[in-house]
Image (cartoon, helix red, strand yellow):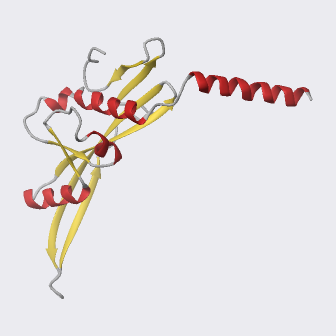
Amino acid sequence: MKLLNSILFLILISLSIQAQNPAITDTELTNLYVRALNSRFDLLLTSDWKYIEMNKAGQQIKNLNISNRYKFLTNEELVELSLSKEKKILVHRLTHKITDQNTVDINFTSILLSATRKTNPSNGTRNKKIIYEVEPKDSKAYQPDIRFVRDEKKKTWKMVTCRFGPIPEN
């Protein structure tokens, strides 16, 4: 009986903590992606386009208040771009990791995409060859690119880690 009471007590404590710390909403996550992209001064200060893969995150933020240095393209559009330029293009993939209810990591993966078009001599069909090269991370241990922590008192998200330069004012 004591074991059952202990288990029920732990369940109630867990539910109480979850009620006090609601999970991040889609709107909050989208806003964190926007802040992360706008904090990438290393990307913003160069003159060429920065291509962002149109995954779920890209679809959510492409029409928001983002620098005009970024182009959001689908995988098909990225392949066609590589074919038309006849060279590799650098694509940035945005992902997130919710480490707990008050911490969200935004990570950038750099991918080199190259596409070529070849004609098959036996039947004359044109085929595309697509190569994705993912740039490895520097460290074996997980380190977030940009980390946000929720300030429960102010009900805001504060950037606490930025691998790409100084942390902007929150």
Quarter of the view holding residue 33: top left
The residue shown at (18%, 29%) is: 42
The quadrant in which the C terminus is found is top left
Give the x, y percent position of residue 72. 21, 46
Which is nearer the eye, 129 or 2? 2
Which is nearer the eye, 82 or 74? 74
Give the x, y percent position of residue 169. 27, 14
The residue shown at (22%, 54%) is: 113
Identity of the residue furthest to the right in this view: 1
The quadrant in which the N terminus is found is top right
The residue shown at (25%, 56%) is: 75
Does residue 143 appear left or right of residue 70 in this picture? right
Does residue 82 appear left or right of residue 39 in this picture? left
Quarter of the view holding residue 149: top left
Which is nearer the eye, 13 or 127? 13
Which is nearer the eye, 88 or 7? 7
Identity of the residue furthest to the top in this view: 153
Identity of the residue furthest to the bottom in this view: 122
Count of number-bearing discs: 0
Does residue 15 appear left or right of residue 9 in this picture? left
Give the x, y percent position of residue 164. 26, 26
Give the x, y percent position of residue 36. 29, 29
The residue shown at (82%, 26%) is: 6
Quarter of the view holding residue 160: top left
